[in-house]
Image (cartoon, grey):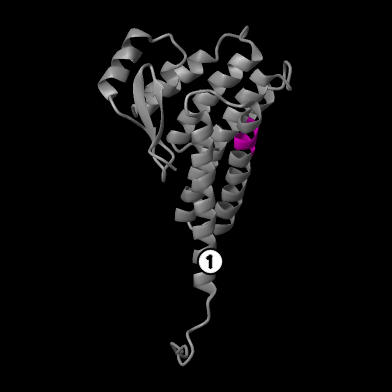
Amino acid sequence: MDGPIGFTAAGVQVIVDDETLRESVQDPAALAAWCAENPQDPRTVAHLRMLGRLDEAAIAGRNSLEDPALPALVRAVRRTRYAHVLQWQGAYLPAEEQFDLAAEETGLEDPTSPSSLAVLASVFQHRAKSRFEHSLAQRRAQNPRSATRLRQHALEDARRALTMREMLGATEDGALASSRQTVARLEREVTRSADAADGASEPPPPGRTQTSSR
């Protein structure tokens, strides 16, 4: 890919890391000032998350969902932001539940409208990142089967989001580039994991024999 992948948030440049797929705010003070000036804006949830203020982001995320009169698509967007906060907190299973609900909400009005499909693509994109991080956590916890399953599901989500955004001709700031970045990162992870598994199962080199510890 040419150059870093990023977007702007409240006029502040944000870069998405190629390895972690997490955002890095280039001017945290400016984004923090925007949050202080716009505490009721629902976008504050994502901005606080990117600033690492996760407890505040979680509270803001829950509060943003309280209005029962919210249209389904608006609720799906806000729920996705909240789920992303849970992911960054390491609460992967609650995050998964919120992403699943958001996906359902995108189909409550007109599931084939461009706006519904665009929001659904965003849900898939962010759920892919959450599943990716969850897979890394499972690998660290010595749960290889769970890690493999989550990696596969993450890649499926990421590819689905990319296909949908390409079909829609996404014009949102960095959306297509971000989807391509996510797919590329997950494909690298699948390849690395497969290579590591192959290396672990290789027999001893010719001319060497395993010695018994007994």
Quarter holding the N terminus is: top left
Write down the quadrant of residue 25 in the picture: top left
**What crowding class fits label 1: few (fewer than 14 Cα within 10 Å), some (14-19), or many (20 or more)?**
few
Instruction: Reply above or below: 3 against 195.
Output: above
The x, y position of residue 201, in whole percent, is 54, 74
Instruction: Reply above or below: 65 against 53.
Output: above
Q: Which residue is mark 1?
A: 197
Q: Mark 1 falls on what kind of element?
A: helix
Instruction: Reply above or below: 66 against 191.
Output: above
Front one among 211 and 182? 182
Residue type pointed to by label 1: Ala
Q: Which residues are magenta?
A: 160-164
The x, y position of residue 186, in whole percent, is 52, 48
Q: Is residue 161 magenta?
A: yes
Q: Main secondary structure of the magenta part?
A: helix
Q: Does 188 sit left or right of 49 as displayed?
A: right
Write down the quadrant of residue 20 in the picture: top left
**In this orientation, does residue 97 appear?**
no
The x, y position of residue 183, in whole percent, is 54, 44
Q: Is residue 127 magenta?
A: no
